[in-house]
Amino acid sequence: MSADQSIDGWLEKLGFGRPEAQALARATLERAGLTRPGKQRISNEKLPRAEALVLGRFFLHCGNPECEAEAQASGRQPLLCEPKSRCGRCGGSDNRKAEVAFLEACRSHAVKRLVVVGGSPAVREELESALGGALGLRAIDGTERRTQDRARSDLEWADLVLIWGGSELHHKVSLLYTQVPPAMRRKVVSVAKRGVAALLAAAVEHLRRP
């Protein structure tokens, strides 16, 4: 195993793949004495310090407006990253962007408990992984029988209920959550589109309405 690495290649792996970003990162390393002009390689033992230095100096973002705004507010110098998977906010994932935006909207609107009705087992697991640490979450299998009492309990518990009509969801199950008294109707959102990003985008739009 080599005891050193190409500086340009290493910076590119970190997300400094754009020429201007790479030049700024390299200048930062040179000022810190971790490399010098014209040198092409850096020893592996210097890499942890070098990584902490450049990532502490710069906030890499993908160019998405929300990601750029977080970069601007970070106290670090914003830089467009390449590849986009190195974005410090969303990791280049549409789902991740939607998850971050949704959690921000939940914090702004005091939403702490979420019920999602529908979705495949894999998608419900993804939502649990992405949102479960920040919100109380009940992900309901829309293909299994559910009693009216259990549905009413979910509705009373939740701050927001997403009915995912574009997923695996039986009509009898969805009716338990949509045919509700007017007092509960404000917290129930029906979403016909497929995909996690579309589901959460619809929820954000609902929360932002006056």
Image (spheres, rainbow, N blue to C red):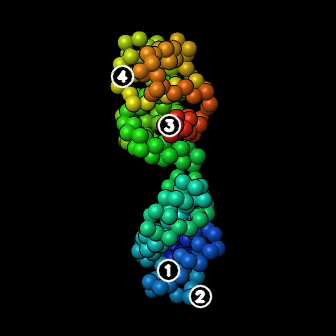
Q: Disc number at residue 210? A: 3
Marks 1 and 4, the one that precedes in the sequence: 1
**Which residue does the numbered mark 1 point to in the structure image?**
28
Amino acid at the residue labelled 2? Gly
On screen, 173 above or below 43? above
Q: In this view, does 68 lie to the left or right of 161?
A: right
- How far is disc 2 from disc 1 in space, using C-alphas? 14 Å
**Of callouts 2 and 1, the N-terminal one:** 1
- Residue at x 50% of width, y 55% of height: 89
Q: Any mark on residue 156, and which?
A: 4
* Alpha-carbon span between mark 4 and mark 3: 22 Å
Q: Mark 2 points at which residue?
A: 38
- How far is mark 3 from mark 2, CA to CA? 58 Å
* Residue 125 image point, x, y percent: 46, 34
Using the rendered image of the protein, determine whether residue 139 is visible from the camera's viewpoint: no
Q: Residue at x 39, y 30 (%)?
A: 159
Image point (54%, 44%), residue name: 98
